[in-house]
Each structure stands twice: as C-alpha cells, then as structure tokens.
Amino acid sequence: MPPVPSMPRTALPPTSLPLYAYALLALIAAALFLPGFTVLPPFDRDEARFAQASSQMLDSGNYVDIRFQDETRYKKPVGIYWLQSAATAAADALRGIPVGDEKVIWTYRIPSFLGAILAVLASAWTAARLFGGPAGFVAGLMLASCVVLGVEARMAKTDAVLLATVVLGQAALAQLYLTRRDPVPTGRAAWTAPLVFWIAAGVGVLVKGPMVLLVSGSTVLVLAVWDREAGWLKRLKPLAGLAIVAAIAAPWLVAIAIKSKGAFFAESVGHDMLGKVSGGQEGKGLPPGYYLGTFWVTFGPWSLLALLAVPWVWARRRVEAVRFCIAWIVPSWLVFEAVPTKLLHYTLPVFPAIAALAAAALLDQFSRDPARKAGPRRWLVAAAVALGVIGFGALTLAVALIPWLVDRRIDPVAVSLVPAVGGLFALALRSLLRTELRTGLAAGLAAAALLYAGTYAAVLPNIDGVWVSRQAARAVEQNRPCPDSVVAAAGYSEPSLVFLLGTPTKLVHGPGAAVHLVADRACGLALVEDREAASFLDSLGTAVPLPLADLTGFNYNTGRRLHLTLYRLPAS
C-alpha cells in the first residue's frame, strides 16, 4: 500500500488571506448576487410572508409582535424582521422617500444579500485558517457561485443571514480547536474567538432559533468523541458565553412570551419545529437521501469536485483541519436527512465545509499518485463528471424550458444560455481534470455567473405567467376606481398578493368577495378565480359586476394553471 501523501497529522500553520483577496471575493459575490435582485417579484410563499410581516412592523411601529395581516406569525423569532425593517428604513431614507411609502421587495432582500457576502468572506477565512490562503480563496469562490446560495441571497428570508452566523461561529470554533495545544492566551486574545462564537450564536438564535446551535453543538460533540478530549472547550468560556446569548435573545423572548401569552413558543417550538421533526410539513415530507440526490444541483457547478475529494478526505481523516470539516458536515447532514421535512436550502450550513475540503483537495490535485491503480479513479472521475453534468446541465435546460412550459413561448435568452453555459462548463471540466486550475476555476465561475445573470435578470422576470400577483397588481393599478381601493381576492390567496396590493387586501371565498363589492360599491374591487366565480356571482344576486381584466398564469406552489377576473360593481 503506498504511503498517504502530503499533509501532516496536525493542523497547518496559521495562514490568512490578504485584505485585497477579501475585497475581491466581496466584489465577485456581489456581482453574482445582484442580477435580478431588484427586478424579481416577490416569491411565494415564505419570502412574501417575511417581507409583509416586516412591512407591517414598519407601519405599526410594533417591533415585538410579528403579524401577517391580522394573523400572528410565530414560526420564527424576530431577528430577520428587525433586519429587514432596518434595511428598508435605511434604503427609503437614502432614496429620499418616507419610510414605507414606496413598497418594493428588494429593500427587504438587503439583509440576505449582505448575509450571503459575509458568509462567503467568513468561509474564506475559515478555509484559509484550515488549509491555507489559496484554499480559502477558492473555497470562497465556490460558495459564492454555488446555486443554492445564489437563490438565498436574492430572497427576503432567514437562510443567508443564518449561514453567516453559522460560519462565523464555526470559524471561532476552528481557531480554538486548531490552537488547543498552544499555551492558553491571556487578555484580549483569550476573548476574541469566544466573543465571535457567542455573539454569532445569539444573533443566530434570534434569526432562526436553535439551528445555529445544532451545527456548532454537533461539531463539538463529534470532535470530543473522536479525539477523546474536550478540555479545549473551556477556552470557549461557556458560562460567559451563555450570558451573552441570553443578553441578545432573552429580552425579546420575554417580551413576546408576555405579549403572546406563551403562544409564540407553542407555535414556533410545538408546531413549526416539532412538526418538521415528526412529519413533513406543508407536503414537504421526503425520504432520506433527498439531499444527496439534489446536491449535484445545489452545489453546482462544483459538486463533482466534492465527490472527487472524498478519497483525499478519507486518506487525511486524522489531519485536524480535515477532521474539523468532517465533524462539521456529517452529523448535521445526517440530521437533515433524518428529518422528514426537507427543503433544498436546509443543508446550506454545511456547504462552507464542503467547499473548504473540495478546494484543498483540488489544490493538492486530489493526491494523484502514479503508483495507485487507475481503475477506481477512472470510475470515480466518470461518476463525478456524469453527476456534475446532470445536475448543472439539468438546471440550465430547465431555465431554457420554463418560458415554454409556462407562457408557451420560446425565450431567445433562455435558449442561448444552453450552449454558452454548456461550453463554459465543458471547458471548466476539461481544465480541472487536466489540473489547469486557473482556467478551470475561471471557466466554472463564468458559467455560473452567466447562468445566474441570464436567469435572474432576464428569463425569470419575463415569464409573466409565473408572477400572477404581479399581473394582479398591474391590473389593479390600471383599473382602481379610487386611490385607496381595497381588493378582495377569492380563490387566490398567495402572500405575494398581499405584499403587492397592501395589508388591507382581503383573502376570501366567492361570497366574501361579493359582500366586499356590495359594501364598498364606489371603490371596491374583487379578484375572482374561476373556481369561485359561480358562488361569487350567485351571492351578488341581481347585481351585475363589470369585468375589468382577465389574468392567466401558473401557480408554482400548487402546480395549477389559473384564470382570474378583476371585477367592480357599476356606480349606482
């Protein structure tokens, strides 16, 4: 058996990236995340719910309670709503308009955009600390350009911000773990890593509850069992740290407990969290293996490198830096696979560690050794290339097909992406397999950038059938009889409709829409889906509504095609 090459059993010496490398990574990440950021309409359903609840916070001035219209929204803590409200207030001030006067979705996406960039930078720092500066830079590039982070950076949700808190906490853990045999630091040096860890944990708890502690806690547990030592955790200063977390999270938790009379904890823990653990919520129950099957898309275009890195990782499992990443990835991944409720972004907190390992293995040329048998490696390369091509290629083809499937039209931009992105991706594969790393990384990055720019800035915004709420908002703007006309929607109750039309929007059935028109004959509007049309018209009796606009589209949440009509009653 040939000797295991290269890395020593202990951690690499401390390394870092120069400031200009972080600046370059931030610019690249921003360039990847910005296309489509301001022009994509609100996505249903979570993004629209988060943004609408944050908008109502701004309108009401109540920053304790969380509401979507008149209903409480107690699934997640308040952190993301505060961040979105602050970002919107700052953006409106910079635009010189009263806060909340011009409601646009992109201001609520700012925390996700900034959180994603911070996650990229923290991932680069962590990978550099573990495997050296070049690996850190490459890992940052991989994370910035992977599919799933590009999605989350453009959505007004919790996950990009959560990722930033997770990676900051893991960076602090990595620093303490790799230096655990060094003399105990004193003074400020003794507090730097613990403060970063516990502040990140406190913010993470306010953003998405205990998820941040799941990742760090499972990492620590695996390392303690694997190494048979846990004394270094004293350097984390747990008692002071828990006090820091309590100082950050407890004031709001106490306030909402009083305000809701305990309903927040019953909903967020009893229903949302335990519901995801015990069964698939909202029809999203999927078997174990789902994340492994979708990884070839979500970590594209770099997923094949992760598979190629597996033998390299296994050969170096005793190296402290590699061991830390394994402890970061494996237990959390197993938990995510075991929980019935599965969404594509749930595994995002472990992607920085995957990127770090893939980058380190790539720069080490996956330990190619002529003495080793070529057969298994050829099979591994073939499998990695096939899965990588299927994942990233399927995504590219889907972008080309969606305009036809939804709007029955051929989008030239979408179609042109297939050969352009495919050619760049093929160049990336060829170069990386030949260890022409600069060319391969540049081509892979270019393929991702081109696909994301074309998809988010050109293709998706122009698929009108997907954005039914946007169609409705345009129709209402063109036909509203009064400046403050309120719409009652029957048969179509997506949260994006409330965000675009305003908090007073009524989500009702057909008879409720009829009652609304009769009660507000001068200004009222009704948006009625075909399934509710009969009950709507019957409830109007002898009154004959005026159809103002017809809308057609596809509800991607329900998988149904829709036809809606906008009505009003004629003036008396």
Image: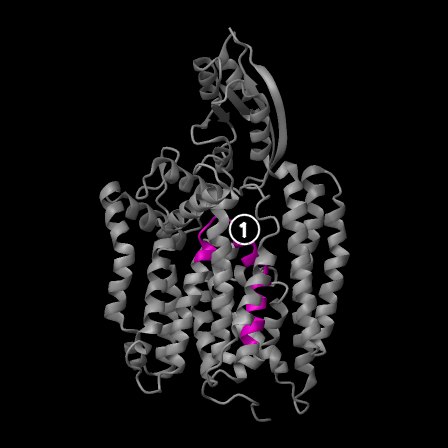
Total numbered circles: 1
**Residue 569 visible in rendering:** yes
Render colour scheme = one colour
The kind of secondary structure the magenta stretch mainly shows is: helix
Residue under label 1, please give it.
154
User: What residue appears at the point 37 percent right and 63 percent down from the top-left corner?
Assistant: 200
- Does the magenta portion include 138? yes
Expressed as whole percent of the image width and height from the top left, the position of residue 445 reads 65, 65
Please state which of residues 195 and 520 is positioned toward the viewer in this rendering. 195
Tell me where the magenta segment starts and ends, as one range.
135-161
Specify whether 276 is left or right of 294: left
Specify whether 452 is left or right of 11: right
User: What residue appears at the point 56 percent right and 19 percent down from the top-left corner?
Assistant: 567
Q: Is 123 rendered above or below residue 362?
A: above
Q: Is 441 rendered above or below residue 471?
A: below
Expressed as whole percent of the image width and height from the top left, the position of residue 421 reads 72, 59
Q: Is 89 rendered above or below residue 236?
A: above
**Residue 210 visible in rendering:** no
- Does the magenta portion include 319? no
User: What residue appears at the point 38 percent right and 59 percent down from the top-left corner?
Assistant: 211
User: What residue appears at the point 69 percent right and 72 percent down from the top-left corner?
Assistant: 440
Specify whether 136 is left or right of 203: right
Expressed as whole percent of the image width and height from the top left, the position of residue 110 reads 49, 50
Q: Tag 1's secondary structure?
A: loop
Amino acid type indicated by mark 1: Arg
Please state which of residues 23 and 312 is positioned toward the viewer in this rendering. 23
